[in-house]
Amino acid sequence: MVSTPRPIEDYALIGDLHTAALVSRTGDIDWLCLPRFDSPACFAALLDDDRAGCWQLRPTRRAPSDGGPLEVTSREYVEDSLVLRSRWELADGTVEVLDFMPPRGEAADVVRLVVCERGRVEMSTTLRLRFDYGRVVPWIVDRGAAGTSALTAIAGPDTVRVVSTAPMTVEDGTIGSRFTLTAGEHAAFVATHLPSHEAARQGARWGTGPHPRAGGRVDPAADPRRALADTLSFWSGWIARCAYRGRWEQEVRRSLVLLKALTYAPSGGIVAAATTSLPEEIGGVRNWDYRFCWLRDAAFTLQALLGAGFEAEAKAWREWLVRAVAGDPAKLQIMYAVDGTRRLPELELSWLAGYAGSAPVREGNEAVDQLQIDVWGEVLDGLHLARETGLEPDDTAWNLQVALLDWLEGSWDQPDNGLWEPRGPRRQYVHSKVMAWAGLDRAVHTVTDHRLPGPVERWRALRDVIHDDVCARGFDADRATFTQFYGSQGLDAALLLIPRVGFLPWDDPRVAGTVEAVQRELCRDGFLLRYDPAADGGADGLPGGEGAFLACSFWLVDALQGLGRRREAEDLFARLLSLRNDVGMLSEEYDPVGRHHLGNTPQAFSLVGLVNSARQLGGTSTRTSASGAHQHLSRSDR
């Protein structure tokens, strides 16, 4: 029997810039991969049920209507941080739980601090560690220390120490605790992960008391309140660098914090989402692993971060990019692991039922082997944007760009898989050609504006060839719109980016015709599908459908604004903001019929769309050199 899961929008994120956990409105941590984003999950209830691993912490009283767990009365992030405060207002008292993961030292910590503010509240916790996505039950050893309970869970390469100020019990591989707090009292639970060999090397010291940390970092198990203060200080210090000021400041700041949470600090890579296999259609098979670094998503994220003043993150991303794609530019991948690993084989985890029965559950992503020519253009555009916005020059980055351009010159006209990763045949996708044009366009302007060496006349000539080819073969004059691929009857929301990257100016009638056609054919209750899966005989090669794609809906906001339809743009933006959950999260897609989130969460692409649309509507877009300044050039300059 498939259990009824919490809605995707029920979850909030905590993280330590190496990995992230999802916390539900009932106080359950239902998803956590250790030690990093793409590691196997030790809490995988999100994709099955409690038996796959979870950590429940809540008042013992149950909801009166159905006997289920009591939802929070309210919850919020503390200021501009990733510290989640969940609050229960009960007849007998008020209690709050502060969930957070301190920025990583040499170990990953999950801290759950329970504070009773009023009256008397009985609490309970059940910690069910199940490594390898629910398959492995750990061996739990009692290593108590004076004044605390301390247990150590061991399973192959993983060791987790659990320390609590409340007494804990162990039964059938599950840790439990039941305790009562009165006003002013608090209790703390800290779970700390180390590789088993590292825990063994530290011997008896591991699991019996404070664990020494490098760089003067406090051990959360020894002083959880100090760890809380340090975590709040980290986030307040980071967001203080935000340069965005405008009408939607709080929404932008929250989205930037969530984007930062999707950054893998050791390498500077940015994952597309914190989860795998949350479905694009409930009960369907469109369930993918997004815990990797897509070059395209990262390039869009770069726009948002640079535009908000976060140059250090942009520099780290550029360095990660240069390392990850080093070598033969013909072997550029659309995605990499957070450390730059190239091989990401796709496996089906058959023992997991999937979210609401949506199977299969996947680890890895077969799309890593696809050819997506637009990625070359996105990378070239992103590196150009970094240079234009004042990021210090880097000779290696320019050498990489020249190598990518050499490949693009000989391959731009190949059919490819397109940006949406369909699993059907390769096509001549219009967006891919437009981004090939954009890559060459940025190269031309880099040589002419920054005096860097390169065959500018050859690049300029090829840029014009691509432009003419797209306008001749990718535009349907009878329908007054560009199409998804040459000869296609379908449309693609990515066509909205044609004026944004400077391929055509906003006042070109082909742009207005395309925007109107996309609205007419791809809108569902005002939100955009990225394409129609049924178009052209189901050319994407997959059964079923999907929800409205939120990033594309933000692109429509930008398109309406670019066409001077500001009221429509602001109305759609307001509707999109209303889709965020109570703590500002957006997933990949939205079901306009069922009115719930779909797809992996939180989705970097969606959050970036929010930030960039807010800045576009506010007149503070960073895309001056990389698009806007090029939109009205003469034909000879294009």
Image: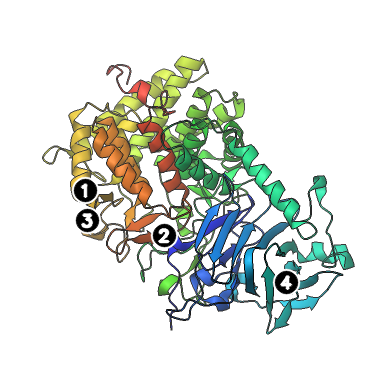
Give the distance between the C-alpha atoms of the residues marked 1 and 3, in whole angstroms.
Answer: 8 Å
Q: Which callout, 4 or 1, points to the residue nearer the camera? A: 4
Q: Answer whether labels 1 and 2 touch (C-beta < 8 Å).
A: no
> Amino acid type of disc 1?
Ser
Dot 2: few (<14), some (14–19), or many (≥20) neighbours within 10 Å? many
Place of residue 221 in the rendered image (x, y in percent of width and height, measured from the top left): 77, 60
Q: Earlier in the sequence, mark 1 or mark 2?
A: 1
Quarter occupied by residue 442:
top left
Q: Residues within 10 Å of mark 4 (few under 14, many from 20)?
A: few
Q: CA distance from mark 3 to mark 4?
A: 48 Å
**Residue 419 is at least partly visible in this image:** no
- Residue 156: which numbered mark, if any? 4
Mark 2 or mark 3, which has the lower sequence index? 3
- Few, some or many C-alpha atoms within 10 Å of disc 3 (few <14, some 14-19, many ≥20)? some
Q: Please tell me whether mark 2 or mark 3 is closer to you in this view.
A: 2
Residue denoted by label 3: 535
Q: Nearer the viewer, mark 1 or mark 2?
A: 2
Labels 4 & 1 near each other (Cβ < 8 A): no
The residues tagged by marks 4 and 2 sit, at their Cα atoms, a distance apart of 31 Å
Q: Secondary structure at mark 4?
A: loop
Q: Earlier in the sequence, mark 1 or mark 3?
A: 1
> Where residue 521 sits: x, y (%)?
19, 50
Image check: 152 left or right of 575? right
Scheme by which the image is coloured: rainbow
Disc 1 from disc 2: Cα separation: 27 Å
Give the residue displayed 36% in from the left and 69% down from the top. 284
Residue 589, visible in the rendered structure: yes
Quickly name the residue at label 2: 599
Local SS, label 1: loop
Q: Which mark is residue 488?
A: 1
